[in-house]
Image (spheres, rainbow, N blue to C red):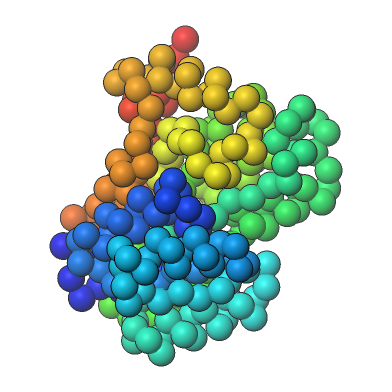
Amino acid sequence: MLQNKFGIIFGVANKRSIAWATAQALHAAGARLAFTYQGDRLKENVEGLTNDAMPGSLLIPCDVTKQEEVDETFRRVGKEFGRLDFLIHSIAYAPREALNGEFLDTSREAFVTALEISAYSLAQLARAATPLMTEGGSIVCMTYYGAEKVVAGYNIMGVAKAALEASTRYLAHDLGPRNIRVNAISAGPIQTLSARGVGDFSSMLKHAAEKAPLRRNVEPREVGNTALFLCSSMASAITGEVIYVDCGYNIMGI
């Protein structure tokens, strides 16, 4: 499905990452992948995952708060791959203290940090990737229902994800004439490294499984398979959308 296609994935932290499940789906479909990491600790994790499962993958350090690292990332991708067919944005961060208590108490610093890393980075990376998407392409980001409705404890990340979803639509408009599609996947709660920072996350998992029509939580591989679909030609007319992969939880009222 993705033979002779090249992509880059931002956000693999460990084997439980949504980004890693996505990488597995894309790799199995024939794509060649580049991965970014932030810091030596995460480099070890990504190397450990890719060395055995995806030898030959390109690993590049990239902190999205440093434009020079973003520029160097895409320079190396261009040199190694020649072009880019898809980009997976699975980056989100907010200071831990901003994910507890009330949103009312969010500091300016925490607000700016969360919005820069979790939302602005989508436009930043899309801008850098566009010159390499010479044959069109697909950009996929990861969001959550807390962007649309209040989820207690999600706080500033809900606001950041709302900005991410709006950015998805505006980028879809801007990049459509270049045949570049931009979509978001809204996954149900999944036990990942970043999710551990959300207050009372275990209650979120339990509630979602009880209320979702399928009566269970979504699995990372299901999110990865949806990303594969969005990166493939099967989704050639889909852009600017938020695709829910949450076992139906988002359709429920009381």
Query: On the picture, is 181 further left or further right than 157?
Result: left
The answer to whether residue 171 is visible is no
Residue projecting furthest to the bottom: 79
Q: Nearer the viewer, residue 169 or 59?
A: 59
Image location (x, y in percent) of residue 220 = 36, 42
Query: On the picture, is 254 further left or further right than 251?
Result: right
Give the residue displayed 50% in from the left and 69% down from the top: 36
Q: Is residue 217 above or below residue 43?
A: above
Image location (x, y in percent) of residue 40 = 61, 68
Give the residue displayed 31% in from the left and 73% down from the top: 55
Q: Is residue 48 above or below residue 4?
A: above
Residue projecting furthest to the top: 254
The number of numbered discs placed on residues in the rendered structure image is 0
The answer to whether residue 247 is visible is yes
Query: On the picture, is 161 further left or further right than 7?
Result: right
Image location (x, y in percent) of residue 243 = 36, 41
Query: On the picture, is 221 further left or further right than 141?
Result: left
Image location (x, y in percent) of residue 71 = 57, 81
Q: Is residue 21 above or below residue 31?
A: above
Q: Quadrant of residue 57?
A: bottom left
Where is the N terminus found, in terms of image quarters? bottom left
Q: Nearer the viewer, residue 104 or 73?
A: 73
Give the residue displayed 69% in from the left and 47% down from the top: 94
